[in-house]
Amino acid sequence: MSPVMRFGEFRFKPGLNTTIRRGIKWMPSSGSRVPIADETGEVKGAIQVESTASSRFYLVSDDAIAAWHAEIWPDNMRPFARMFHVSQALERCYRMPLFDAAELVTVVWFRVVELHGETGLELVARPMPGVS
């Protein structure tokens, strides 16, 4: 049985998305279909992993941050502000205060291929609240 990737923020953009995971657990998953679950562990669909890359969090590219699955970023939002927002989300997700920007993470580039048993269904992430 393949590992299940859990999402605390179960929102996705049409097309290519990224998720940023602590450590290197998801490095060998390029090209694979991975079941996805919500916070409770209930499997809700599957993603197709396009590629993976590991680095220190502070070295993650702006392209990877911009493609983060849970947000539609305002055009005028600076890359540093996006990265800070993602680091706060990681703190909440991993329940750890002060996420260390030097921590080793894996960026997983993926497409949603199945959601609630329907293939081709695309959800749209919500725009960031309070930012114009």
Image: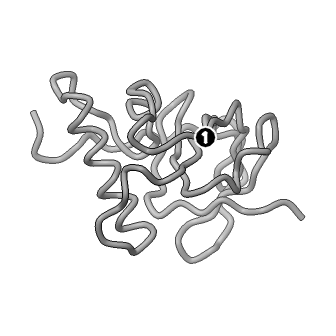
| Label 1 Cα neighbours within 10 Å, binned few <14 / some 14-19 / many ≥20 | some
At horizontal 43% and vertical 34% (from top left) the residue drawn is 59
User: As rendered, which of 118 and 56 lies closer to the eye?
Assistant: 56
At horizontal 27% and vertical 38% (from top left) the residue drawn is 82
Q: Give residue 88's position: percent from left, percent from top.
A: 29, 57
Residue 131 lies left or right of residue 36; in this view the side is left
Q: In which quadrant is the N terminus drawn?
A: bottom right
Going by the numbered disc 1, the residue's amino acid type is Ser
Quarter residue 76 falls in: top left
Q: Give residue 120's position: percent from left, percent from top.
A: 67, 35
User: As rendered, which of 19 and 36 lies closer to the eye?
Assistant: 19
Residue topped by disc 1: 54
Quarter residue 124 falls in: top left
Q: Give residue 11's position: percent from left, percent from top.
A: 45, 50
In the image, residue 5 sits, relative to residue 52, either above or below, namely: below
In the image, residue 66 sits, relative to residue 58, either above or below, namely: above
Report the label total.
1
Residue 83 lies left or right of residue 61; in this view the side is left
Residue 21 lies left or right of residue 76; in this view the side is right
Q: In which quadrant is the C terminus drawn?
A: top left
Q: Looking at the image, which residue sits at the far front?
A: 102
Q: Give residue 34's position: percent from left, percent from top.
A: 75, 50
At horizontal 21% and vertical 22% (from top left) the residue drawn is 75
